[in-house]
Image (cartoon, helix red, strand yellow):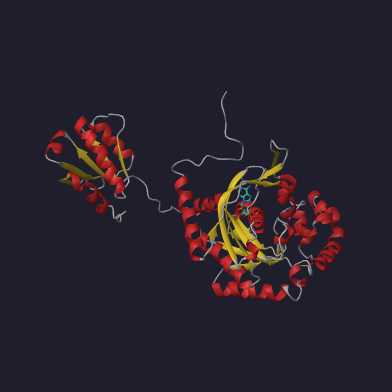
Amino acid sequence: MSFQIPRGTVDLMPGEVEKWQYIEEKARELCRRYNFSEIRTPLFEQTELFQRGVGETTDIVSKEMYTFMDRGGRSLTLRPEGTAGVVRSFVEKKIYGEPQPTKWYYIGQMYRYERPQAGRQRQFHQFGIEAFGAVDPVLDAELVDLGWQFIRSVGVSGVKVALNSVGCSRCRPRYREKLVEYLTPYKEELCKDCHTRLEQNPMRVLDCKKEGCQRVTEDAPRMVNFLCEECAPHFETVKESLDLLGVEWYLDTRLVRGLDYYTQTAFEYILEGQGGHAGSLGGGGRYNGLVQEVGGPEMPGVGFALGLERVLLALESRGVDLPLASGVDCFIVSLGDAAKKRSVLLLKELRQMGSTAERDYLDRKMKGQLKAADRASARYVAIVGENELEKNQVVVKEMATGEQNTIQLDKLATYIREACGKGQS
Ligand code: HAM
């Protein structure tokens, strides 16, 4: 019997995982600066949370969820996205009763049963942000900027923000009516999925990527022309603030997003020159009704999530090499039993002083140990033989230059730390 990794999932192997650590650290650092705190919610939630939160008619809920019964007969679902769980926690813990806003971020696995292809997996990772308790449109713009800064800070260039307003429960019904009125005569030209959308969620027809549907919707009425007296100025301020912050954005009046909870601001980070789903690195928007939908009081929210696989793909397609630290600072080569014993202590000292250090564990000869040092990409090799040990000395060789120095054994850890520019630990 041979086992295989489940379809649509990947092992993040050493060599690759360092890139993940790098971009995750960039995300965390940025969140610290914007004063967002991390929240970690469960990988699974009650199925109904997503049905209510994300919406029954969305592709995510109707086609893509990993739903199962647990041994107690409860229906649970692996989270297809992060917002619903975060909102559940916000409501359940009554965080809404505390002074607002609440600013949270998360990094973690999400699950959607989709057809795997480049940039689309069944288990994938999102870096997401959620801010509750403020209707201020400048906050929307600041969040858009945060995501944009993140993308740029890891080295992805040529990303623009597609922006729209999807209105609210006051202005949307009138627009919906006009849209259905416009689309109905063209029904036969729409794809099969759009027939259902036309009945259940007509705004999603605007988002359909099929050529025929795009042709039909080209001159369809636009939500931005139907915004109410609250949504219109909100949208104006979002746009002004984005300009103020220097974010490169454009109006995309077809942008409706695939989740039901959005109100007012909706946006996506689009990678120029990359068509299809892989070109959308992430997206988000406002969700002023979601907290209530999940059982809390009326409380606004806004957020976004970026797909980390897609960010890494974008880095690859742009040919960006991340500045990753690799290799160990010092590899100890020891010859003879006494030297080997001493090298164990030396290693501990090196590591305690904050250096990365390694040795040979297979009793190799000198040549084999030097090869192992090479494989470990050691910056320095410290050689301890019987002679050196007698004199309490060690030979330190810098691999890049071949330069050699003999130093006192008890000075090795300090020497390496200084040579590698490491601070006091
Ligand atoms: P979403 O647009 O469904 O939004 O997903 C956000 C991002 O997750 C996508 O743009 C994409 O980069 C990534 N993503 C989605 N599905 C996959 C997949 N199968 N494989 C790889 N990457 C994928 C949300 O999830 C909302 N919760 C965002 C949000 C947060 N809105 C407000 N707050």
Residue name at image x 73 percent, y 70 percent: 224
Residue in the foreground of this view, choosing between 422 and 215:
422
Find the residue positioned furthest to the left. Answer: 391
Residue name at image x 75 percent, y 76 percent: 229
Horizontal side, residue 147 vs residue 256: left or right: left
Is residue 155 at least partly visible in the picture? no
Residue 331, horizontal then vertical, whole percent = 28, 41
Residue name at image x 72 percent, y 55 percent: 53
Residue in the foreground of this view, choosing between 414 and 257:
414
Horizontal side, residue 394 vs residue 162: left or right: left
Is residue 184 at least partly visible in the picture? yes
Residue name at image x 23 percent, y 34 percent: 341
Horizontal side, residue 298 vs residue 402: left or right: right
Q: How many marks?
A: 0
Residue 377, horizontal then vertical, whole percent = 32, 43
Find the residue positioned furthest to the top. Answer: 1
Residue 414, horizontal then vertical, whole percent = 23, 51
Residue 354, horizontal then vertical, whole percent = 32, 50
Q: Quadrant of residue 396?
A: top left
> In this picture, is 374 found above or below 187?
above
Q: Quadrant of the N terminus?
A: top right
